[in-house]
Image (cartoon, grey):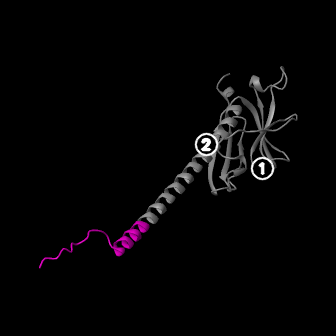
Amino acid sequence: MKSNYTKQAGVTLIEILVWITLTAILGLALSGLFSSLVKNYMYGQRRYDVQQTADLVLLNISNNLRYGNNYDIKAYTPAFKNEALYYESIRPDEFISPNEPGKFLYYIDKNDFHFYQVPFAGGTPIRVPGHSFVKPTDIRITEIPDPETPIFEGNSTHMNISVRVTDTVYNQFIDQTIMIIPINSFVK
């Protein structure tokens, strides 16, 4: 006698549970990989932003100092380590009066750890601009912790500026040094 009973196709409960378990394991592995990639991207992007901040701050300072002379390192109370770089600018846009070149100081403020420029005769300090993608409160500009690398060093022919720019969010830093030779050393 023939049976009318036919075999049914489908999946069993065990197969569904195995499929769910394997999918969950694969999903966790991929989410961990994705999370790691995003974290590394954010770290790298932040490092790039800090590098840009350091470059732009020193570029702004060096552009002014290239048109300066009479460099000197002065004691200045608001300055980090009480040091400030004094210079006389010969740029027309920085004149204090039409007959006399402007005299300025650069210093690192003790409270907010940013570079400032201030007229030597007095006036409002102007923060040296940096990169706009990093919040100013997340960046600290300090000396490089090496006794042989001061913030300001040089003489009347050139000036070296060495700083450490630190991102306080990811605790990463970049040490920057720039040497500035005034243009008037070449044009006489």
Would you say residue 81 sits in the magenta stretch?
A: no
Q: Which residue is mark 2?
A: 52
**Rendered image quadrant of residue 188:** top right
**x, y percentage for residue 27?**
44, 63
Secondary structure at numbered mark 2: helix
Would you say residue 17 sits in the magenta stretch?
A: yes
Which circle's residue, 1 or 2, is located before the other in the chain?
2
Q: Amino acid at mark 2?
A: Gln
**x, y percentage for residue 88?**
78, 31
Looking at the image, is 28 positioned above or below residue 188?
A: below
Between 16 and 3, the residue placed more toward the observer is 3
The residue under the point 81% across, 28% down is 102
Between 153 and 107, the residue placed more toward the observer is 107
**x, y percentage for residue 153?**
71, 44
Q: Residues within 10 Å of mark 1 (few under 14, many from 20)?
A: few
The image quadrant where one finds the N terminus is: bottom left
The residue under the point 64% across, 41% down is 178
Q: Amino acid at mark 1?
A: Asp
Q: Which residue is mark 1?
A: 112
